[in-house]
Amino acid sequence: MSLDEYREFHRRSVEEREEFWEGEARRIDWHRPFERVLDYSEPPFSRWFVGGELNLCHNMLDRHLEERGEQDALVYHSSETEEKHAYTYREVHREVNALAAALREIGVGKGDRVVIYLPMTPKAVFSMMACVRLGAIHSVVFGGFAAGSLAKRIDDARPKAMITADAGMRGGNVVRYKPLVDEALNSATHPPEHVVILNRNLDREMSLTEGRDLDYAQLVDRHRGASVPCEWVESSHPSYILYTSGTTGTPKGVQRDTGGYAVALAASMDHIFDTQAGETFFCASDVGWVVGHSYIVYAPLLCGMTTLVYEGLPVRPDAGVWWRLVEEHGVSTMFTSPTAIRALKKHDPRFMQEPDTSTLRKLFLAGEPLDEPTSRWASESLGVSVRDNYWQTETGWPILSSMNPGLEDEPVVAGSAGFPCAGYDLRLMHEETGRPVTEPGERGILAIQAPLPPGCMSTVWGDDERFVQTYFGDFPGGELYSTFDWATRSEDGRYFIMGRSDDVINVAGHRLGTREIEEAISSHPDVAEVAAVGVKDEYKGQEVFAYVIAKTTEEAGPELEEAVKRTVSQKLGKIARPKRVFFVEALPKTRSGKMLRRSIQALAESRDPGDLSTLEDPQALESLKATTPID
Ligand code: ATP
Ligand code: MG
C-alpha cells in the first residue's frame, strides 16, 4: 500500500464504519453472532456488535488449543527473583481453569468485580483471564500503590474478591504488599469478603486474617484439572475497570466493553503492530497500566502469539537484560515507553548491540512524547525501525501511529506520532473559538468525533454523567471527545503532539507547548532531562520555569543555566526563554513514567501539589522542594 491507499483505507474505516468493523469482527470467535454492528442511538455512548455473545478467555485460550496447544503462550522472566518459566497454551488453559474454579467457589460470578493487586508474575495474567472467563470484571491496581489509593479503588469497584501477593520486588528490594492491603481493607467501606494471597515467600512475617485470607496455591491445587465453561457475555458486558495515570488530576475509572475491545485489539495487531500468530511479542510495561492490559495480556494471546512477561528494571542486573531476552526468545516485536529508552540511553549502547537481536523487526514506543535523539539512539543501537504511537487509557489502543498499513516504507518524521489509526475520526479544535483548525501547523486540541471506535471506553465506571461531562463537554454539539492533548497537523496529515492542554504555558498572550520548550532544552548536550512549567507572573500572566537534570553534577551551574536560556531563545524566540532554571536530581513522575508537571507548577506557585496517589517516588518531589526555593 502507498500513503494514498492508506488514506483511502482510513477514509473507509470512518465513512463506511459499519462495513469496515463488520469485516474486522471476523478475527474473533462469536458464540452468538451480533445483530447490529453499532448502536449509536444515545450519543455520545456507543455500543459495538450489539447482541453478539463471546468470551475473551475463550478467544485467548480455548480456540487456540487445537492448533497451538503446545506452543508457548507465556514466557516469564524476573530479574528480581531470578524466576524463569514458560507456559504453553495448554498449560495456561489449565492454570486459568483451576483458578476460575477456585474463584467460583468463593462466590465470584458474572458481573462481580475482582480487584487484582499483584506484581508482574504470570499469576497476574492468569487472574485477569480467570475473571473474564467467569464474566467477572477485573480492576487491576498497580502493585505497590499506597494503601489510600488502593482503598479508593476498592470502594469504587465494591469487589467480591481480591487477589494479591505477600510482596513485590523493585530494584532488588522487597516491597511488602500485605500490610498495604490490610491497611486498605481496614479503611475501605466496601472491602471484599475474600482475599486470595499469592505467597512468593518474600515476606516471612506476613500475617493472615482467618476466614478472609486464602492461599492462592492451596486454593488452585484443590481445583487442579477442573474445567470451567466460559461465560458467554453480550458484547457490551464490561470486561474491566482501569484507572488513568493521574498525570493531570484524580485518576478516572475507565470501563471497557468485551466485544469491541477484542475486535479492536486483534485488528491493531495486524494493522499497527504488524505481527503474526506464533511470533513472540515483548511488551515491557506493567499489567497495572493500559499498555500492559492491551499488549502484555489481551492482544498477543487473542492473536495466538507468545507473550513475554518481565518483572524488573530495564537496567538491572545491567542494561543488556532486555536484549538478551530478545535473543533468547527470538522476540519479533517490542513495545515500551520513551522513558525506559531514556533510562537505557544513560548506558553504553554495546549492551544493546552485543546480544543477537536480529529477530527484532520493530520497537514501538508510547506514553510520552518521543524526542528525536532518543528515537535515533534506539534505532541506531538496535538497527530496527522505531515507531511512535499515541493513545490513552481511555482508548485502549493507538489513536495515532507511524505504523499503519502502507506506511511501512514512509519516512518516519521526527516528533510526529504519525497518522490516525483506522477507525479514529480526528479533529483539531481551536481552544477558544471551538471551531476546527484548518491551517497546517496551527495548534489545536485533538478531538475524536463520536461514535468512538470499538475498544474505547464505554463510560466512566458507575458515572455516566462524569463520562459525558469530562470528555464531551468542551466543544459545541456534545459529540466531540476531547483528548486534552495539544497537537498540530502537517499538510500531508501527520500529527504532532505538543503536550497537554492543561500544561500550555501562556507568556504575555503567546501560547507555548511544554514539549517544544523541553525539546529545545534537551537538545543541549549537557542536559539529561527537563520539565518546563508555566508559573504565575504579575506582568506576563505566566513565565517559563525549567527544572533540569544535568548529565553530571559538575555541569549544573550558572554557565549551563545561561546556555539553557540561550538555546531556548535561539530555537523558539525570546518569549519562551525560561525566567528561572533549577538544577535538580530527580523529577516527579507517575508510576507509568509520566512527568507530573502540575505538581512542579504547584510547588513553584506555593500551592498544594494535588492528588499524588500515582507518584512514583515521593522523594523526587521532596528533593525538588529542597533544591528549588522559590522566592
Ligand atoms: P490522567 O488522564 O489521569 O491525567 P494520563 O493522561 O497521563 O493521566 P494515560 O492514559 O496513562 O493517563 O496517558 C495518556 C496520555 O499520555 C495522553 O493523553 C498523552 O498526553 C500522553 N501520551 C501517550 N502517548 C504519547 C505519545 N506517543 N506522544 C506524546 N504523548 C503521549
Ligand atoms: Mg489523560
Image: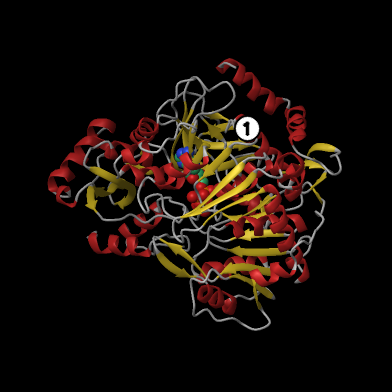
Q: Can residue 424 be seen in this view?
A: no
Q: Where is residue 43 in the image (x, y as percent from the top left)?
A: 73, 42
Q: Front-most of 131 and 539?
A: 131
Q: Mark 1 points at which residue?
A: 276
Answer yes or no: disc 1 within 8 Å of ligand 1: no
- Residue at horizontal 57 percent and vertical 32 percent from the top: 427
Q: Position of residue 631 (x, y in %)?
A: 22, 60
Q: Where is residue 55 in the image (x, y as percent from the top left)?
A: 77, 49
- Residue at horizontal 35 percent and vertical 39 percent from the top: 509
As displayed, is residue 470 above or below residue 279?
below
- Quarter of the image for the N terminus: give it: top right
Q: Front-most of 143 and 512?
A: 143
Q: How crowded is mark 1: few (under 14 residues within 10 Å), some or many (20 or more)?
A: some
Q: Position of residue 320 (x, y in %)?
A: 37, 45
Q: Is residue 605 left or right of residue 368?
A: left
- Residue at horizontal 39 percent and vertical 33 percent from the top: 382
Q: In this view, does 143 lie to the left or right of 319?
A: right
